[in-house]
Amino acid sequence: MKNTFTAIDFETASTGRTSICQVGLVRVVRGRIQRTYSSLVQPPGNSYRSDFIEIHGIDAAMTADARTFDRVWPEIQKYIEGELVVAHNISFDDGCLRHTLAHFGIAVPEYETACTYKIYDKGLADCCREYGIKLNHHEALSDATACAKLYLKYTRRNRSGR
């Protein structure tokens, strides 16, 4: 079990995997949260579906002056490239990352993945309630922080044999 990893969460403006509008990232080194990062991101065309705005509360006015993902990528690349990347439903977040990098013509780096949804077989809000983890659901940094705490709980449990 690795206790050095990056937990990540993306919020999107629509069903399109390239429509990232917020990124939250938590860097964990040797079992301790060392860095957090959060940024609004202007999705392509700064276009939003109203039902997605209802989910996370982010709209076009909030990201009108935000950087596009290709401008955010250099700040987070070192926490992803060659690292273990953990998410709650990694297939969604990994898909967003890969599709968005391809959209901007950026090479997809090598990295490993782990999924707390697969580990716990429950939604993020349910896991957080069960384990007493504070969550502001669908706020990317809060979701990434909760995911990091869940993965740490999992690695500690497996190290101790419980």
Image (spheres, rainbow, N blue to C red):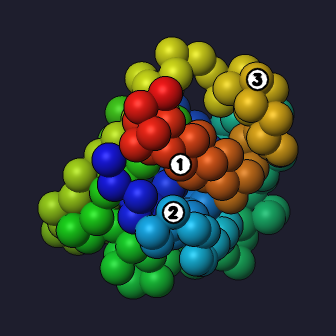
Among the 4 quarters of the image, the one containing residue 92: top left
Q: Amino acid at mark 1?
A: Leu
Looking at the image, residue 66 sits to the left or right of residue 69; the answer is right
Q: Position of residue 65 (x, y in %)?
A: 70, 78
Q: Earlier in the sequence, mark 1 or mark 2?
A: 2
Q: Residue at x 51, y 69 (%)?
A: 27
The one of 22 and 68 positioned closer to us in this rendering = 22
The mark that comes first in sequence, 3 or 1, is 3
Between 34 and 155, the one nearer to me in the picture? 155
Measuring 51% from the left and 55% from the top, which residue is drawn there?
8
| Amino acid type shown at disc 3 | Glu
Is residue 140 depicted above or below 120 in this figure? Answer: below
Residue 26 image point, x, y percent: 57, 64
Task: Tell me the crowding category of disc 3: few under 14, some 14 to 19, or many 20 or more residues within 10 angstroms, Cα based.
Answer: few
Looking at the image, do the residues carrying marks 1 and 2 touch, with CB atoms under 8 Å apart? yes
Q: Earlier in the sequence, mark 3 or mark 2?
A: 2
Q: Amino acid at mark 2?
A: Gly
Image location (x, y in percent) of residue 82 = 21, 68
Residue 151: tell me if it is visible: no
Is there a contact, CB below 8 Å, between mark 3 and mark 1?
no
Dot 3: what SS? helix
Secondary structure at badge 1 equals helix
Q: Which residue in the protein does label 1 denote?
A: 152
Rendered image: mark on residue 31: 2
Is residue 24 left or right of 95 when viewed as pictured? right
Give coordinates of residue 96: x percent, y percent.
40, 46
Classify residue 64 by image quadrant: bottom right
Residue 142 shows in this picture: yes
Give the spatial CA distance, label 3 vs label 2: 21 Å
Closest to the observer, 30 or 100: 30
